[in-house]
Image: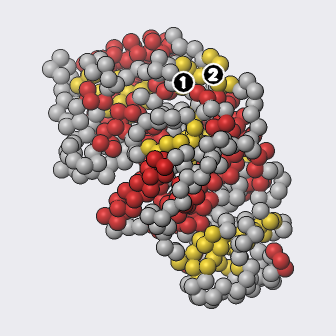
Amino acid sequence: MTPDGATLRQHPDDNVAIVLAPGGLQAGALALDGTPLIEDVPFGHKVALADLPAGGAVTRYGVTIGLATHALGRGSWVSDDRVTLPPAPSLDRLPPPAILAARSSAAVRIRAGATFDGYRNADGSVGTRNLLGVTTSVPCVRGVVEHVTRRIETDLLPRYPNVDGVVALTHAYGCGVAIAAPDADIPIRTIRNLARNPNFGGEVMVIGLGCEKLVPESLLPEGQEDASVLRLQDTAFTGFQAMVDGMLKQAEGHLDRLNRRRREPCPVSDLVVGLQCGGSDAFSGITANPALGHVADLIVAHGGSVLFSEVTEVRDAIPLLTARAADDAVARALAREMAWYDAYLDKGGADRGANTSPGNKTGGLSGIVEKAMGSVAKSGSSPIVDVLAPGERIRRKGLTFAATPASDFICGTLQLAAGMTLHVFTTGRGTPYNLAAAPVIKVSSNSEIAARWHDLIDLDAGRIATGAVTVAAMGEALFSLILDVASGRHTTAADRLGLQNDLTVFNPAPVT
């Protein structure tokens, strides 16, 4: 990066710089290389460092992020309405995997003996929380389940002090659906795998109605098909209170087993950390996401597992990813998931360009290519060892691409289904996003939002932009915070405030 205090150029080949000055720069101010601004440029937005002809490449991160809609003079504001998208990279001619397997994040420093205090499970996984999860097979039972979870919190949990809480895994699937249709396996395996998240300790409690197409037993792990299923239409229940009493009685057995568990020191190799960004701005790819990339490399170097996602937000960076694939099979899987999502968007009459939100643009992002180049920085530099289709569960240690939509809520739900036990979420515009099933650490990409949302942001990475701290130092600080949060020693800002978002199951299949 080449900052001058007021502007920053990400790559030596870039022909734009980002405005760092709070409040932006006015016409007449000087940017890098002595470029005089010929108009006002807002904070976080781009200024042209050279004359750009109509159709000329706008270059950031050393790549073409867009094409100028008309001629822009040196010192112009390169706003989103003055840039159009270039074609997406072809999926037929992608770089093959490079020889990365032996490299494994050589730039990071291993912390000998680094551990966190987690909950060991019978299947070998380790949770960062000790929760009772109550999953549902159909949305009809949601109101009853939420009523009962409130009763569990007030009436039962005080008797089980080692249980961290109860989470209702509610969703809008299971009734009136084409259960055997193509792609129906995506929501079904998502719901099934949500209940298998390590933070629920292997205890499975499924509440159904009785007439739904998604049979409750299909959501239970193999070998537990006859356990912990309750249907509200069961003739044993006469009235609402009988249903509530039945669910409370069922919950007590689960709570008793969970209450016997204790945290114990676990190596970093037992962590499964999910990475996501939301409300991104032009600083996300300079500050917060590169810091996450350093953390991803640290966790992988310690033998742990990292998930990165959001198909549309890596689609334009796919040549960089296939080159980092651990082998040809992983490279093919990356291309397969990109192609599937291209077809999904095309069927809906959309394309990747629909991803960029009004807030992204206000924050200085001109389009999805610029956003993708900043988003992919979260993945660091380690080899990509596996690719998960939506709803699949993690299979390997190391860096995994879990294919998901970019929606914060759908992505978070799918990462939980994949086995994520702790979430790190970067934001430039700000969001109160949080999950009940796993702690969420929020990292700001600029210091302005960190100051304004002082009680919602856990770590300010904005200082990287001004050179006050390095990416590596911020990554090390975040790594320490992850271990503290995973151990229950530190409570995240959103958890202190009691915030949480609904789960959102991705369903590309028909509804009848």
Look at the numbered discs 2 and 1 and tell me whether their residues touch, using CB distance below 8 Å. Answer: yes
Q: Residue at x 80, y 83 (%)?
A: 36
User: How far apart in space, not on screen, are marks 2 and 1 (Cα)?
Assistant: 8 Å
Quick one: SS at disc 2?
Answer: strand
Give the position of the N terminus as an image quadrant.
Answer: bottom right
Query: Where residue 463 sits: x, y (%)?
Result: 78, 53
Mark 1 burial class by Cα count in 10 Å: few <14, some 14-19, many 20+: many
Question: On the rendered structure, is 377 left or right of 509?
Answer: right
Query: Where residue 122 sits: x, y (%)?
Result: 47, 17
Q: Is residue 241 above or below residue 450?
A: above
Q: Is residue 294 above or below residue 6?
A: above
Picture quarter containing residue 105? top right
Q: Residue at x 22, y 26 (%)?
A: 232
Residue sitting farthest toward the front: 99
Please name the amino acid that badge 2 sits on: Cys
Please name the amino acid that badge 1 sits on: Val
Question: On the rendered structure, is 42 left or right of 7?
Answer: left
Q: Residue at x 50, y 13 (%)?
A: 259
| Disc marking residue 126 | 1
Picture quarter containing residue 192? top left
Number of callouts: 2
Residue at image mark 2:
266
Query: Where residue 508 sits: x, y (%)?
Result: 31, 52
Q: Is residue 292 above or below residue 286?
A: above
- Residue 185 shows in the view: yes
Q: Residue at x 27, y 21 (%)?
A: 225
Question: On the rendered structure, is 333 left or right of 8?
Answer: left
Query: Where residue 486 sits: x, y (%)?
Result: 62, 29
Quick one: SS at disc 1?
Answer: strand
